[in-house]
Amino acid sequence: MSTNVVLTIVVGALFAAGVYLILERSLTRVLVGILLIGNGVNILFLVASGPAGKAPLLGSNAADEISDPLPQALVLTAIVITLGVSAFVLAMAYRSWQLNQHDDVQDDVEDALIRRLAEMDEASASYDRSAGGTLDEEGSDVPDVTSSQPDGSGDRGTS
């Protein structure tokens, strides 16, 4: 039993193009990437199922002559999942177009804050609280001054 090399290369190309498109900011490109990966999964199931055979329920065929019905069921399931995910991404792209007149995904505010904290090499307030910071009477965070010196020379329990 040998695999079809051309279909294997097609699966690899569909997966590569789909992953490349999913990493873009435009939801339309993400949608096309999801569709490409969905088609790649369907072809992968057909390649992995082996050669075609006779129908499994008709006549008295030998076990090696009939086809396996499980990959066909998996392909149908993959089609339904791809349809659902595509409808969701298409709805998000349409709503983004209604609100902003473009379908690009914007940076998240929290993501930008975490990126700035990482560039400054500082921890967030919740991390400071778990690392030894305290809460005052109103419940706001009071950082531990000995562990957050700007030059990194604070007392961290070492002498």
Image (tube, grey):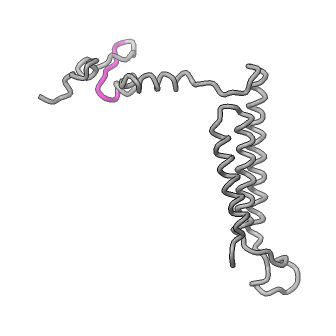
Q: Position of residue 107 (x, y in %)?
A: 59, 25
Q: Main secondary structure of the magenta part?
A: loop
At horizontal 62% and vertical 38% (from top left) the residue drawn is 23
Please state the extent of the stretch shown in magenta in the rendering: 130-137
87 part of magenta stretch: no
Q: Toward the viewer: 120 or 136?
A: 120
Q: What quarter of the picture does the N terminus occupy?
A: bottom right
Q: Position of residue 25 (x, y in %)?
A: 65, 32
Q: What quarter of the picture does the C terminus occupy?
A: top left
Q: Position of residue 90 (x, y in %)?
A: 77, 35
**Looking at the picture, does residue 150 appear above or below residue 29?**
above
Q: Residue furthest right?
A: 59
Q: Toward the viewer: 130 or 53?
A: 53
- Left or right, 146 with reference to 85: left
At horizontal 74% and vertical 60% (from top left) the residue drawn is 43
- Left or right, 16 with reference to 51: left
131 part of magenta stretch: yes
- Left or right, 145 with reference to 92: left
Q: Quadrant of residue 26?
A: top right
At horizontal 75% and vertical 53% (from top left) the residue drawn is 39
**Looking at the picture, does residue 23 appear above or below residue 95?**
below
Q: Position of residue 97 (x, y in %)?
A: 77, 24
* Total numbered labels: 0
Q: Residue furthest top?
A: 138
Q: Quadrant of residue 146?
A: top left
**Looking at the picture, does residue 62 appear above or below residue 38?**
below
- Left or right, 129 with reference to 21: left
